[in-house]
Image (cartoon, rainbow, N blue to C red):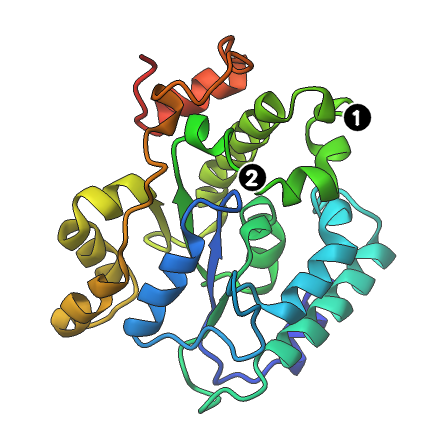
Amino acid sequence: MIFSLFLKREEPSWHPPLIIGALGGSGTRLAVSLARHAGWWMGKRVHPKTQDSLPMRFFLNHWFETLLDFPNIAPEVQQNAASAFRRAVLRHRKGIPSPQARWGWKNPRNMWLIPFYASVYPQLKFVHVIRDGRDMSLSNNLFLLKSHGKVLVGSNWSANPAAAQLEAWARGNLRAAEAERYCAPGNYLRLRYEDLCLSPHVTARRLFDFLGASESSIDEALREVRPSAGIGRWRSGQADGTIAALSPAAETALRRFGYLLS
């Protein structure tokens, strides 16, 4: 397999990574903070506001759209992607306190590429962060659409950004949920932002158990939880009717992830 070249060069003592992904603005920064409290090293070269890994951001800026079709891409393209990914990993890991430290990275776009990541790290842990797509449709964070909207939802997405954002939310999160089958048993966790805000201790315990961390630091970690004032904003009249008619993907996703439709 083409990725065996990567694995042969990789330090055998490295712990499999923790990968955090979502639609941007869903609460991934909070997930990073909690992971750090749980003892996971999430990088030093990160964006100060978003906590995205900068080396991984650079990698995804170039390779994201190509790797959406993984593994159905040409072998030579896979080889180039593997080499670029290895360089990004090595840059991201600079400054890690120990080669054996538990480590990982966050980038919202990760949730689209779990099949690729799992081909390199079969024992990776994936935290899939999710927030009500109707609230997300009203977000000002349109990075994904501005960068990849044409590929993900169609070239006319800018005619109705709220509807396009909801569609990207639905397609991406359904894809991420299906990616559980690429993870080893027990290595996928879905973390709803609303659950973390409304039932913080119960939800944090699930996360800490998933990460193999002691519960002794949960109370300290939960000081980071500051529920967004935007929870449920789609009900408040801020929506202007542009998402009143749900697409099949949006309705399927809202039901699948436990969000009431009324």
- Give 184 or 216, whichever is nearer the viewer: 216
Q: Is residue 1 visible?
A: no
- Give 233 or 144, whichever is nearer the viewer: 233
Residue on which disc 1 sits: 155
Q: Is residue 240 above or below residue 39?
A: above
Q: Position of residue 53 (x, y in %)?
A: 58, 68
Task: Identify the amino acid type marked 1.
Answer: Ser
User: Image quadrant for the N terminus?
Assistant: bottom right
Q: Is residue 21 visible?
A: yes
Q: Is residue 148 above or below residue 250?
A: below
Q: Position of residue 219 (x, y in %)?
A: 14, 67
Task: Identify the amino acid type marked 2.
Answer: Asn
Q: Position of residue 89 (x, y in %)?
A: 63, 74
The Cα atoms of the two marked residues, 1 and 2, are separated by: 19 Å
Q: Is residue 18 above or below residue 243?
A: below
Residue on which disc 2 sits: 140
15 with respect to 90 (left or right): left
120 with respect to 59 (left or right): left
Dot 1: few (<14), some (14–19), or many (≥20) neighbours within 10 Å? few
Q: Position of residue 95 (x, y in %)?
A: 54, 89
Picture quadrant of residue 257: top left
Going from N to C along the chain, the mark reached first, 1 or 2, is 2
User: Image quadrant for the C terminus?
Assistant: top left
Camera-nearest label, 1 or 2: 2
Q: Is residue 44 above or below residue 225?
A: below
